[in-house]
Amino acid sequence: MIKTISIPDLLNQTLENIEFDVDRFEEMEEPENIEFPHKHNFYEILWITNGKSKHTIDYKTYEIEADMLFFISPGQLHLFEEWKDIEGFCIVFTEEFFLQIFQNKNMLFELSYLDNLYENPFIKIRGEDKSKLKAVVDLLINENEKETIQALLFVLLKQIQSQFSEKGNSNSKQQIVIFKQFKNLVYENFTKNWALTQYANQLNITLHHLNSIVKSVCNKTTSEIINERIILEAKQLLQFSDDNISEISYKLGFEDSSYFARYFKKHTTYSPLDFRKLVS
C-alpha cells in the first residue's frame, strides 16, 4: 500500500526525531528512497516565489506558480512534479509540535486552509502580505529556540488565515471547527455505515444543524462528504493494493460487491475494474 513518510524521511535523516523544519527549495536535497505518490504524517506549507510546477493531491491536479502558498495535510495522497526548477520555501511541522503550546486541537481546526477537504489548497499572495510573511519566515529560518519557533509558527499560520478571511470566507470559527470534527469522524468511521444521525450525535448537535454547517462551509451535503471519502479510499485500494473487488468492497463496509461496483461507477463513471486498468 501507500507509504506514509515523516519529516525525517523528507530530510534524509531517518534516525532523528524532527517535528519542524523550514528550508529554501533551492537548498534542499532531493529525498532519498521516497516513492511517489505517498502520504505525510505532518503538515506542509509550500511558498513558491519563482517557477511553475504541478501538484496532485487525492487525485486532483493543481498548477503551482509564483507567489502561491500551497498546503498539504496529513493523510493526503500526494505527488509533486517538476520540483527542481522552483524557488521558495518549504515549511513542515507535526500536529504535536504546534499543539504543545496550546493543548487545544481546535486551534488547528480553526485554520480553515489546513485539513482542507472542500476548497482549493492554495492561495495567491501579493504586495504587503508577501513582506509580512517573508519577515516571519526569515525569523523562523534563523531561530533555534523551540518555544520561539512555536510562537513564530503560530504567527505565520494566523497571518495566512487572515488572508483567507480577506477573500470573503464568511464562516465562523465554530462552523469551521464543527465541520472539521465531522470530517475527522468520517475519516475514522466511514466503513461502519453509520447513519447521519450518529455523526450528529457524536458532535452533540442536531442533524439539521450539521447539515446546515456542512452546506455553509463547502456547499455540499453530509452524504456527499461521506461518499467522497469512500470513493477516495476505494481508488487508493484499487490502485495500490492487490485485493480483488470483493475484498475491497468488504474493507469499505459493503456486503455486496455488485452493489459496491454500481456505487463506484455512479460516483466516478468507471467500473472498479476499468478504473484499476486506467491507473495501472
Image (cartoon, grey):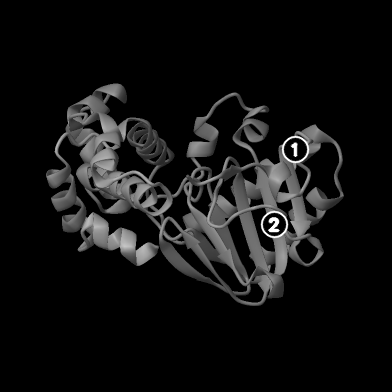
Q: Residue at x 39, y 35 (%)?
A: 184
Q: Work out whether mark 2 precedes mark 1 in sequence or the reverse, and give the earlier one.
A: 1
Q: Which circle, 2 or 1, is nearer the viewer?
A: 1
- Give the image quarter of residue 193: top left
Tell me residue 168's x, y (percent). Answer: 42, 59
Relative to 35, 146 lies left or right: right
Q: Quadrant of the C terminus?
A: bottom left
Q: Residues within 10 Å of mark 1 (few under 14, many from 20)?
A: some
State the SS at label 2: strand
Q: Amino acid at mark 2?
A: Cys
Q: Which mark is residue 90?
A: 2
Tell me residue 104's x, y (percent). Answer: 55, 26
Q: Nearer the viewer, residue 135 or 96?
A: 96
* Location of mark 1 (residue): 18
State the SS at label 1: loop
Q: Residue at x 39, y 50 (%)?
A: 236
Q: Residue at x 75, y 33 (%)?
A: 17
Q: Nearer the viewer, residue 256 or 170?
A: 256
Tell me residue 44's x, y (percent). Answer: 61, 50
Q: Residues within 10 Å of mark 2 (few under 14, many from 20)?
A: some
- Give the image quarter of residue 9: top right
